[in-house]
Amino acid sequence: MITLDQLERGVQAIIEHMDTNDLPLKLIEMGCLPGNTIQLIQKAPFNDPLYLNIDGAHLAIRKETAQHIFVRLVD
């Protein structure tokens, strides 16, 4: 298991666990939940923020926030 900020561009993963105390409620409302598929689309300069596809929803989150989301790579 790795954190979301370690995910490589274009690789799909499944959200396994999140530190919900450290995540904004809006992120959870937009589908960032355990069991959902997530893919890193692009990293901005200096690797912050990260542009993601979470079950069809596109959003950008800060690297600091991504460090609290644990994912499992999809084969």
Image (tube, rainbow, N blue to C red):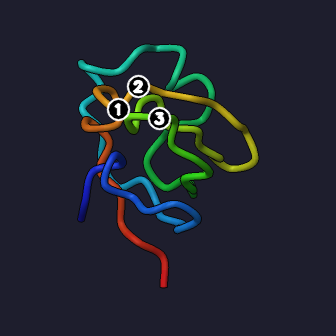
Q: Give the class, few, some or many, for how many residues have Cα within 10 Å of label 1's Cα (few <14, many ≥20).
A: some
Q: Check the image and report above or below for 22 versus 16.
A: above
* Residues under numbered marks 1 and 2 in contact, where contact means CB atoms less than 8 Å apart: yes
Dot in front, 1 or 3: 3
Horizontal relation, residue 58 to residue 45: left or right: right
Q: Check the image and report above or below for 53 versus 72.
A: above
Q: In the image, what residue type sits under mark 3?
A: Pro
The x and y percentages for residue 45 are 47, 35
Secondary structure state at the residue bearing disc 2 = loop
* Residues under numbered marks 2 and 3 in contact, where contact means CB atoms less than 8 Å apart: no
Q: Quadrant of the N terminus?
A: bottom left
Task: For marks 1 and 3, give the CA distance.
Answer: 12 Å
Residue placed furthest toward the bottom: 75
Secondary structure state at the residue bearing disc 1 = helix
The x and y percentages for residue 15 are 42, 53
Horizontal relation, residue 70 to residue 74: left or right: left
Which numbered tag is attached to residue 45? 3
Residue positioned 33% across, 46% down in the render: 5
Q: In the image, what residue type sits under mark 2?
A: Arg
Q: Which residue position is annotated with label 2?
A: 62
Residue placed furthest toward the right: 56
Horizontal relation, residue 63 to residue 14: left or right: left
Instruction: Decide which of 1, 34 is in the foreground and name it.
Output: 1
Q: In the image, what residue type sits under mark 1?
A: Lys
Task: For marks 1 and 2, give the CA distance.
Answer: 4 Å
Q: Give the class, few, some or many, for how many residues have Cα within 10 Å of label 2's Cα (few <14, many ≥20).
A: some
Q: Which residue position is annotated with label 1?
A: 63
Secondary structure state at the residue bearing disc 3 = helix
